[in-house]
Image (cartoon, helix red, strand yellow):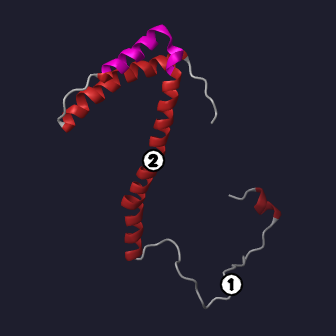
């Protein structure tokens, strides 16, 4: 995998974002949804990220890299799910309706009566026709 240089500002932004996102997710949202008690370990993770933010932001890079690998995998899966959803909910029904109503823009069966599909031009092209084709 190609190594991309990450600036200190980007690492600091990542640390700030994760230092509030992890506690919000694991201390507020998930306990509320699953009706569980509040866990306090996210505060420790948040404190570690904030200490790296202030003391040595470059130490956040391994955490950032792991998170980006996970986010890349999630993005890859989400793309396939969204594209499949659009195909089966939008494109496929439109194709079925066009086929039912006979409005397809192409021929679906070969014409057995013709020997060839080649069409010859009735007019002869001149040099001037090629200078301005449109």
For the residues labelled 2 and 1, the Cα–Cα distance comes to 46 Å
Say which of 46 and 4 sits in front.
46
In the image, residue 81 lies in the stretch drawn in magenta: no
* Mark 2 or mark 1, whichever is nearer to me: 2
Say which of 43 and 80 sits in front.
43
Badge 1 marks a residue whose secondary structure is loop
Q: Quadrant of residue 97?
A: bottom left
| Side (left or right) of 107 relative to 51 | right
| Side (left or right) of 123 relative to 50 | right
**Prevailing secondary structure of the magenta residues:** helix
Where 129 falls versus 34 (above or below)?
below
Q: Which residue in the structure is indicated by mark 2?
A: 77
- Residue 84 at what x, y percent from top left? 43, 56
Residue stretch in magenta: 43-60
| Res. 62 in view | yes
Kindly identify the residue that appears in the image at 78 percent across and 73 percent down.
Answer: 124
Q: Which residue is farthest right?
A: 127
Kindly identify the residue that appears in the image at 52 percent across and 17 percent down.
Answer: 59
Q: Earlier in the sequence, mark 2 or mark 1?
A: 2
Q: Which residue is farthest left?
A: 35
Where 32 falls versus 11 (above or below)?
below
- Residue 66 at what x, y percent from top left? 50, 31
Where 134 falls versus 37 (above or below)?
below
**Quadrant that contains the N terminus:** top right
Badge 2 marks a residue whose secondary structure is helix
Give the numbered dot on residue 116: 1
- Residue 111 at what x, y percent from top left? 58, 86
């Amino acid at each position: 995998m190609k190594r991309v240089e990450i600036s200190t500002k980007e690492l600091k932004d990542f640390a700030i974002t994760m230092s509030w996102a992890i506690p919000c997710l694991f201390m507020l949202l998930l306990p509320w949804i699953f009706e569980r008690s509040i866990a306090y370990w996210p505060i420790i993770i948040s404190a570690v990220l904030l200490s790296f933010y202030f003391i040595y932001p470059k130490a956040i890079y391994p955490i950032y890299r792991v998170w980006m690998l996970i986010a890349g995998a999630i993005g890859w899966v989400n793309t396939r799910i969204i594209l499949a959803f659009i195909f089966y909910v939008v494109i496929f029904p439109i194709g079925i309706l066009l086929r039912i109503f006979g409005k397809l823009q192409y021929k679906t069966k070969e014409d057995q009566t013709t020997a060839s599909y080649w069409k010859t031009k009735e007019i002869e092209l001149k040099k001037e026709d090629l200078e301005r084709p449109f």
